[in-house]
Structures are given as structure tokens and as C-alpha cells.
Image: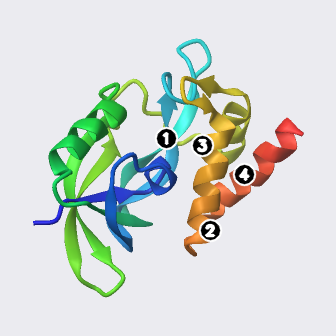
Amino acid sequence: MTMWVFGYGSLLWNPGFPVARREVAVLHGYARSFCMSSIHHRGSEDKPGLVLALDETDGAHCKGIALAVEAGHEEQTLADLRERELISSAYLERDLAVELGDGSSVTAVTYVIDPNHVQYCGGLSLEEQAQIIARAVGGRGPNTEYLYNTAEHLAEIGLHDRDLDWLAGRVREITA
């Protein structure tokens, strides 16, 4: 059976595992937003950044990519994903149904935010998000790089995200 992973942020442009197939997919009941404070990868404890997470929201949906893991790499992929995504307990690992472009559905390993975790910061205005992202740097580099790469890769596959596009433009203004 094929192992699927749902990518909506950095997994779009840096999956970190061998991908056999990529399919545009929709996850219902969750919204993509910068609702997780990043104290490791894109910020620090002193100056947290922001990373994308899936926030459970009635009536929402998130367009992303379902990534089929190359056969024989499932166990290592799951171990690597857990090391990367579960660096703190802010993300919860879930097996969720995602709808593919042809209308079929697959179950995908998906990382969603724990709204009760200290790193959860939902509800920030776009301007507040832009100010944080423009200045934060973490172990994997500047927060701006994370934003720009995600917005660009979404646009490349025709999945424009108005909030991310606005944030990318605003952050470029702030950092100019």
C-alpha cells in the first residue's frame, strides 16, 4: 500500500524523502496559516519566527500536494518526518483523508497544529505576521526564505494563496 504525505508548507519544496508521485490535493476542515511560533527552524527562543501549520477550522480547506513515498522508503520517511516535524510537540501527526484532483481520496500522514500548545499563535493579523517573519532567523535559515519558497512553490503549481502572496510582498517591503 502506498504511503502518502500531505504537503502544505516546506514539504512542497523540500520533502526530504524519495517521492514517487505528486498530486494536487485538498484537505477539508483545516486552514493553512502562520499560526505556529518557530523557536528552532525559522526562529529562536529569544526571537521566535512563524511557520505554517494546519489549524482545524469548520468549513475551511487547504490546497496542497499529496506526496506518494517511493516504495521501500516508508519506514525511513516516517522516522525522518517525525524527527523534522515533531521537534517540539506543537504539531500532531494525523492520518487524514485528502482529496486528489480526480476526485479520489487517499489517507495521508499530515501534521496539524495543537491549538493547546504554547507555540500556537493563531489569530495574528497579517501585518503582525509580516513583522515577525521579516526579522526572524533559525537553525534552517531566515524566516523570509521559508515564506518566499512556500509562496513561490504554491504559485508554480497553480495554488495561489492570497494571504501568503500578500505576506511575501509585505515582507519584501519591510526588508528592502
Q: Residues within 10 Å of mark 3 (few under 14, many from 20)?
A: many
Q: Residues within 10 Å of mark 2 (few under 14, many from 20)?
A: few
- Using residue 118 as the reference point, say whether residue 49 is left or right of it: right
Name the residue furthest right.
176
Considering the numbered disc 3 on the image, is that residue within a helix, a strand or a loop? Answer: helix
* Foreground residue among 30 and 59: 30
Residue type (three-letter) at the residue carrying disc 4: Ala
- Using residue 3 as the reference point, say whether residue 121 is left or right of it: right
Q: Which residue is mark 2?
A: 155
Which corner quadrant holds the C terminus? top right
Q: Residues within 10 Å of mark 1 (few under 14, many from 20)?
A: many
How far, Cα to Cα, is label 1 from label 3?
A: 14 Å
How far, Cα to Cα, is label 4 from label 1?
A: 16 Å
* Foreground residue among 93 and 14: 14
Instruction: Tell which circle, 2 or 1, labels the residue nearer the N-terminal end.
Output: 1
Name the residue furthest front.
72
Q: Which residue is mark 1?
A: 35
The image position of residue 3, as x and y in percent, is 19, 60
- Using residue 53 as the reference point, say whether residue 48 is left or right of it: right
The image position of residue 122, as x and y in percent, is 49, 40
Q: Which residue is mark 4?
A: 168
Instruction: Tell which circle, 3 or 4, labels the residue nearer the N-terminal end.
Output: 3
The image position of residue 137, as x and y in percent, is 64, 25
Residue type (three-letter) at the residue carrying disc 2: Ala
How far, Cα to Cα, is label 2 from label 4?
A: 12 Å
Residue 146: image tag: 3
Question: Is residue 22 among what the camera can see?
Answer: yes
Q: Are marks 2 and 1 in contact (CB under 8 Å)?
A: no
How far, Cα to Cα, is label 3 from label 2?
A: 14 Å
In the rendered view, would you say 164 is above or below 138? below
Q: Residue at x 55, y 71 (%)?
A: 159
How far, Cα to Cα, is label 3 from label 4?
A: 10 Å
